[in-house]
Image (cartoon, helix red, strand yellow):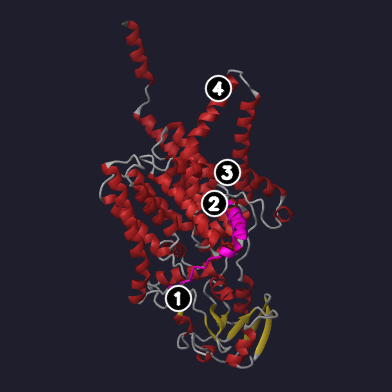
Amino acid sequence: MKTERREQRAGAVTAPSAGHQRTTRAERAGLIALAIGVLFFCYWRQSLSAALSSDGSANVLQAWAMLHGNVLLHGWRVSDVSFYPTELPQYVLIEAVRGAASPAVVHVAAAMTYTLLVLLAALLARGRARGGEGLARALLAAGLMLTPQLNATGIVLLSPDHTGTAVPLLVTWLLIERARPRWGVPVLAGLLLGWTMVADTVVLLSGIIPLVVVALVRSVPGLSQNRGAARGYELALAGAAAVAGVAGAFAPRVIAALGGYRESPVPATLALGQLQHGAWVTLQAFLELFGANVFGFGFFGAAPAIEVVFVALHLAGALAVVCATGVAFRRFFRPGELITAVFAVAVLANAVAYLVSDQSQNLLGAREMAAVLPLGAVLAGRLLGGKILAWASGTRSAIQARRGPWLPGTALAILAVLVVGDLAALGYRAAQPAVPPANQALAGWLRAHGLRDGLASYWQASSTTADSGLRVQVSAVTPGRDGRLVPYEWETDDAAYDPARHDASFVVAAGTPGDPIPGAAVATFGRPQRVYRAAGYLVLVWDTNLLARLGHPGIG
């Protein structure tokens, strides 16, 4: 009895106080905030190592228009993907804080987006697991995404280009997983998927179609162990996703009918005659997304030796994702594992769609399957994190018991090398020198010579405008069917071609052999009064408003 009382008193003395628990939680929150800040800084620095082109610059200009009252982007002709309800509001907030529209907006937003992706992937990978297993799951998923390959900077850490679409997608799955199975969850999930669909139709392959297919297959009697309410709940989620896909596809038409932006659809083209080449490019794209593409053209000759080492270490992560996807398909019909089945189908669907499309002609199209990165990382974390923890714990026990020290010691050393290599790669890539915006020198020259409004081909237009901080307005043109210049209807604002609002006096051309812009400019406006060579470009100047004589698309 005395012994029990002493144990009770000792337990009371050693029990953590409420204040201590609050301190521990505060310390943990502080460490998490510090980690988030470090990740954001590193991704921001790596983003600066890639030059911004007119694609991202056009999004900067669209957000600036929204910030200044043009909420529906009246008069704008966007690309086939609008990013209207996702990245554009993010750009608006950044521009509102900074008070300026410039390439810096894109780099800040890219770092924010990728940091969010890493955190969301870690949370989803953790799932409902707690303790050491939950931590192992989260760390594995985060580790697979932690250090984007330098070659992939333009895909995952620059302009809006499908990578950011995974943010609302992962948020949707966090809702599905964390909320109790009630009727309101499918409704909210459908709203989120529909919202994402308006921004980027790639969510069809990354979320909507996989969810519908998996739920329908798992509902077949005799295949799945799901019964009653569980089966009905999955079908409700699938139904909400299907409705979201249809509604999201029609929403841009409604926005256009209300006077908002108009999309420029690009027809999907199959490349079934080049499947062998497409398969090779798809493999490289998959490896590049996970920082492991050692097969890139001229990679070993062009990349520093240390970068080659970092990329080679990431091959283990890419292999882990392949293994996890296979495990997910084996567990396809297990109750309570809807997310792993959907993510596995989504990874496969994205890879196959990329393989058979004309985007797989080169690695520039790897952005089309960017969702494979966070989805694959979540799969690996959920399905392999606990196994790796158990393996590491077993090897540690074996070392302590002095049984077979060489193999366990080697295994732990491999894990240590991978972790250290990942952190070193993060720092190395963040330390890369910043690259100036693509047309900063041209924008500076135009300002210095008093040229404030003009025309150029697409890749020199929005880029120069954003690089100048909107101090120079350059609008995109292209040769029409009659050889005269006409407005380029892609990521452009109709108001930019209104001679009552703008007084364009120059045309920027590449000036290289075969460039059609100079000849088309002369055919449209006559011979220029002055011609300059500036920042590697040809600048033709007239003493009249060129917009009054500009042709119209579709006429010629």
Between disc 1 and disc 3, the foreground one is: 3
**Discs 4, 1 touching: Cβ within 8 Å:** no
Which residue corresponds to mark 2? Answer: 41
Which residue corresponds to mark 4? Answer: 397
Which element carries disc 4, helix, strand or loop?
Answer: helix
Report x, y in % for residue 44.
55, 55
Which residue is painted at 63% across and 75% down in the image? 442
- Mark 4 or 1 closer to N-term? 1
Q: CA distance from mark 4 to mark 2?
A: 38 Å
Report x, y in % for residue 170.
42, 51
In this view, which residue lies farthest toward the top? 1
Going by the numbered disc 4, the residue's amino acid type is Ser
Splitting the image into 4 quarters, where does residue 94 fall?
bottom left
Between disc 1 and disc 2, the foreground one is: 1
Segment tinted magenta in the rendering = 263-286
Which element carries disc 1, helix, strand or loop?
Answer: strand
- Mark 1 or 2 closer to N-term? 2
Position above or below: 172 against 77:
above
Residue 112 visible in the current orientation: no
Which residue is painted at 45% across and 71% down in the image? 62
Going by the numbered disc 3, the residue's amino acid type is Leu
Between disc 4 and disc 3, the foreground one is: 3
Which element carries disc 3, helix, strand or loop?
Answer: helix
Position above or below: 18 against 278:
above
Going by the numbered disc 1, the residue's amino acid type is Arg
**Discs 4, 2 touching: Cβ within 8 Å:** no
**Discs 4, 3 touching: Cβ within 8 Å:** no
Which residue corresponds to mark 3? Answer: 319
